[in-house]
């Protein structure tokens, strides 16, 4: 059986996870996660609630204090690094709850994440072209935005930093279909620009329109994987895994 | 704890002697209100520092009064040992105390970060005891005096009233500092970082910002403000080891009334309560020591979370 | 802050040791010192009731101790009433003060509560400075100690000693019964998860207020008892260092343990006596001990002992 945890495009991977374990206090969440993400790929993690998808993303960026195994981000071993060091390697997180700061304006939110790779980030004009709604709302408080606008802001602000490896946690959650389409279109643009993206999604239809590969997680491990092109062929298996 | 006002102070005594309402002139009222505003200035600077520290670290810095005291002693030390006057002290005492604060945060406060909030209070309480004890053993309990700088000595004649220049300076300078701090927090990039790290520190770290160092600097800044207040207070209150313990209870009351979530709230409450304290001294002097606490009690009956604050 | 196993053999053994120690103490230590220690031990037990079992940190507990002391002294000296009346009066007034200040402070949580207790105790301090009956800086001196019970001559040291021990043990037993009663279990439930207790229908505020009042009453009793032992009441009984002292005693001994406050009181008072020659450095050392305990040694002496043995103390 083809090992779909490894991508097919040539060159060193942007992310190489091997035997990753993670704990929240006493709870052992990740039991040995193995996969990699190749440059320019968009890999989607699927799985039921509690499978460990968000924990995986958080462990990669270093927000889960107790972790073991090997995580190589853009070539560097990060398993015992602090989050601020890992981010500076060129990886950025767009969290599930979006994390828009209510005590900051939209503009302040947008400019908050520091530039980690000078020259590699998107220019502000380009970002505002990608997200025209934000241009109008620059002076508003962060909490005044709608769900869709918050999601766009959460993605927009990490594009400025120069991070080329993005982690998106459930970007379509709770959004209206028309907004989801917009977000999908934007992510496709980012792929064209060469960003590498690791995404967690429940909505696999949405993911199918943009992903190169799917990985399925259960009980803190990757249990299956297939190319996006093979999604229809694997639909029954997927329904089993996700219980939908 | 000894009361904030030492028993015998020349101008206050003569004012008290002329207490009957009919005899209160604009001059006397103005003098008392100014004294009230001065105390208000100290309350505002101290509660500002407390609020900034509480926002970032989620601890109530009981040692705040002690750093206020150390600031005043720095001024005395700089004058008596280094021969450097008031204007040097205004700059270097806060810097020195800020450094001390940074060391304190690194060595001690960092380690109780994840624990129950009460341990923060207990730890800083213990630190305050140590600091006060060290100074008490070296300098005893009597107050040392610190002179008003020559440039600020003498009276300011406003026509309808005459006020000591130094006292006006204290109020104006404190108000300016508070305003500048508020502007810095609300309008600058660094302020945005501070506000964001206060709201969601781990996400800010995930963006590549060294939040642990920000925390150290915030604590250092907060106590530096306390030290600044100490230098301003030195010529007026005298310098003695208990001066921190004397003032911290009132500052706590100010913070409870104003609510710890709001920077602006703390400052306004500080000045206002100081003013009310001054007013009380004119009409009902015996109550002036406790009026702030009484106001706190009344506010609590109506608004348990304070006037401006978010719930702790 | 600590988990409790049901009251068991460990407590019985410890209680027996306590009683035995009290009987034997006069032969090893200066009885007035032991009596003083018992007063502060009771004060610490009262404080511990609040922080250890209800989760409320009061940084101004001296207001109850000191008011209890002043009222007791006034009743015994100015009104000439017997010791028992004075003790009850002191405890009663402290309880009333507790009820009033508690009603104000209880609605605010954690940190705010602690700060409010600081402010309120400062208010009480200023009141004591100015109120005529306290005689300000001089305090109330030479308080007579006459018992209601015929034949009980409290001016004889060993009689007073037995009397103080008896009252202390009775109060300590009261604390023990309270902690292990349904009321005590409810307090611990509220401490651990107030929202849950409220959602289950318990009126948390009322129970917290009751605990606060009881704690105030016991602290007042401790202050009143101190007046019997030392025959005076003064401003230092209501001041900030007394509030700080009882926190230190409880921390060192072990918060949330039954016997912790007693051990803590002994240790801290011993420290103060032993180090008295160093004057102001005692404050520094106390502060250092404070910091060290909070950072490294949070369970306190009895807490560590209980943890090591797996006992409930």
Image (spheres, coloured by chain):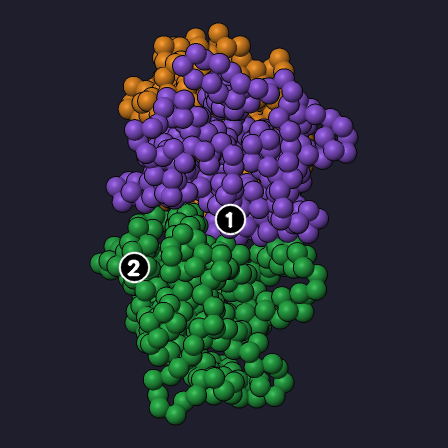
Q: Nearer the viewer, mark 1 or mark 2?
A: 1
Residue found at x 35% / y 79%: C82
Q: Which mark is residue B2?
A: 1
The picture's colour for chain A is orange
Is B196 or A165 nearer to us in this picture?
A: B196
Q: Is A85 above or below relative to C295?
A: above
Report if the CB atoms under discs 1 and 2 are less than 8 Å apart: no
- Tell me if I can see residue A83 in this picture: no
In the rendered structure, the residue with mark 2 lies on which chain? C
Q: Which chain is green?
A: C
Give the residue pinned by disc 2.
Answer: C99
Is B120 or A110 nearer to us in this picture?
A: B120
Q: Element type at marker 1?
A: loop
Residue found at x 43% / y 53%: C129
On the same chain, marks 1 and 2? The answer is no
Residue C7 in the image, given as x and y percentages of width and height: 42, 78
Q: Which chain is purple?
A: B
Taking C89 as reference, is A96 left or right?
right
Residue found at x 56% / y 81%: C31
Q: Is C126 above or below relative to A87?
A: below
Task: Specify the quadrant of the image occupied by residue A114.
Answer: top right
In the rendered structure, the residue with mark 1 lies on which chain? B
Q: Is B125 above or below relative to C152?
A: above
Is B290 or C169 nearer to us in this picture?
A: B290
């Amino acid at each position: 059986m083809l090992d779909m945890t490894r991508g097919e495009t040539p060159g060193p991977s942007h992310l190489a996870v091997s035997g990753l374990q993670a704990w929240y206090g006493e709870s052992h969440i990740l039991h040995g996660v193995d996969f990699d993400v190749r440059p320019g790929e968009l890999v989607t993690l699927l799985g039921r609630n509690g499978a460990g998808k968000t924990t995986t993303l958080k462990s990669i960026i270093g927000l889960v204090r107790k972790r073991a195994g090997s995580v190589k981000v853009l070539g560097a071993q990060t398993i015992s690094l602090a989050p601020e060091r890992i981010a500076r390697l060129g990886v950025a997180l767009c969290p599930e709850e979006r994390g828009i700061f209510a005590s900051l304006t939209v503009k302040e939110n947008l400019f908050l994440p520091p530039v980690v790779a000078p020259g590699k980030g998107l220019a502000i004009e380009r970002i505002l072209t990608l997200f025209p709604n934000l241009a109008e709302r620059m002076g508003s408080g962060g909490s005044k935005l709608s769900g869709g606008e918050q999601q766009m802001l959460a993605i927009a602000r990490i594009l400025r930093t120069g991070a080329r490896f993005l982690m998106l946690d459930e970007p379509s959650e709770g959004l209206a279909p028309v907004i989801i389409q917009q977000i999908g279109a934007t992510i496709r643009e980012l792929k064209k620009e060469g960003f590498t993206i690791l995404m967690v999604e429940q909505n696999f239809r949405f993911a199918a329109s943009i992903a190169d590969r799917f990985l399925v997680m259960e009980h803190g491990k990757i249990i299956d994987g297939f190319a996006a092109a093979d999604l229809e062929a694997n639909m029954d298996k997927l329904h089993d895994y996700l219980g939908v | 704890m000894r009361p904030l006002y030492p028993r015998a102070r020349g101008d206050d005594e003569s004012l008290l002697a002329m207490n009957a309402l009919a005899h209160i002139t604009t001059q006397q009222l103005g003098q008392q209100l100014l004294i009230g505003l001065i105390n208000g200035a100290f309350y505002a600077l101290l509660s500002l520092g407390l609020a900034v520290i509480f926002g970032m670290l989620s601890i109530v810095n009981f040692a705040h009064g002690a750093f206020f005291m150390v600031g005043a002693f720095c001024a005395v030390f700089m004058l008596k040992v280094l021969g450097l006057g008031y204007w040097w002290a205004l700059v270097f005492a806060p810097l020195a105390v800020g450094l001390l604060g940074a060391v304190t945060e690194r060595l001690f406060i960092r380690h109780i970060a994840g624990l129950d909030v009460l341990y923060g209070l207990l730890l800083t309480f213990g630190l305050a005891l140590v600091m006060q004890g060290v100074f008490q053993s070296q300098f005893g309990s009597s107050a040392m005096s610190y002179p008003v700088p020559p440039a600020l000595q003498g009276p300011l004649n406003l026509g309808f009233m005459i006020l000591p220049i130094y006292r006006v300076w204290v109020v104006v300078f404190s108000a300016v500092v508070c305003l500048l701090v508020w502007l810095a927090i609300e309008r600058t990039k660094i302020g945005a970082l501070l506000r964001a790290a206060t709201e969601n520190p781990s996400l800010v770290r995930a963006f590549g910002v060294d939040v642990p160092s920000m925390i150290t600097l915030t604590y250092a800044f907060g106590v530096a403000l306390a030290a600044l207040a100490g230098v301003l207070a030195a010529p007026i209150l005298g310098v003695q080891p208990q001066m921190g313990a004397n003032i911290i209870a009132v500052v706590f009351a100010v913070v409870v009334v104003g609510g710890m979530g709001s920077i602006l709230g703390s400052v306004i409450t500080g000045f206002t309560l100081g003013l009310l304290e001054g007013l009380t001294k004119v009409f009902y002097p015996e109550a002036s020591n406790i009026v702030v606490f009484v106001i706190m009690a009344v506010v609590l009956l109506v608004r348990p979370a304070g006037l401006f604050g978010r719930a702790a | 802050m600590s988990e409790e196993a049901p009251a068991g053999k460990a407590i019985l053994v410890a209680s027996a040791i306590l009683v035995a120690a009290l009987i034997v103490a006069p032969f090893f230590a200066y009885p007035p010192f032991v009596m003083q220690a018992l007063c502060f031990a009771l004060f610490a037990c009262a404080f511990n009731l609040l922080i250890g079992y209800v989760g409320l940190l009061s940084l101004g507990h001296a207001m109850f101790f000191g008011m209890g002391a002043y009222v007791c002294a006034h009743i015994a000296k100015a009104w000439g009433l017997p010791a028992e009346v004075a003790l009850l009066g002191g405890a009663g007034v402290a309880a009333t003060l507790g009820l009033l200040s508690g009603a104000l402070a209880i609605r605010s949580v954690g940190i705010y509560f602690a700060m409010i207790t600081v402010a309120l105790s400062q208010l009480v301090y200023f009141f004591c400075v100015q109120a005529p009956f306290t005689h300000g800086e001089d305090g109330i001196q030479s308080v007579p100690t006459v018992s209601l019970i015929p034949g009980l001559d409290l001016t004889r040291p060993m009689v007073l000693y037995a009397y103080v021990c008896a009252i202390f043990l009775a109060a300590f037993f009261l604390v023990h019964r309270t902690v292990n009663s349904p009321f005590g279990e409810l307090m611990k439930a509220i401490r651990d998860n107030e929202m849950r207790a409220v959602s289950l229908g318990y009126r948390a505020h009322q129970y917290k207020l009751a605990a606060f009042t009881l704690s105030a009453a016991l602290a007042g009793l401790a202050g009143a008892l101190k007046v019997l032992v030392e025959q005076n009441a003064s401003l230092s009984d209501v001041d900030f260092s007394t509030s700080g002292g009882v926190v230190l005693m409880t921390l060192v001994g072990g918060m949330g343990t039954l016997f912790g406050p007693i051990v803590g009181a002994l240790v801290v008072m011993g420290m103060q006596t032993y180090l008295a020659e160093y004057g102001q450095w005692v404050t520094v050392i106390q502060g250092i001990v404070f910091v060290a305990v909070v950072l490294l040694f949070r369970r306190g002496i009895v807490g560590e002992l209980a943890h090591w043995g797996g006992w409930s103390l």
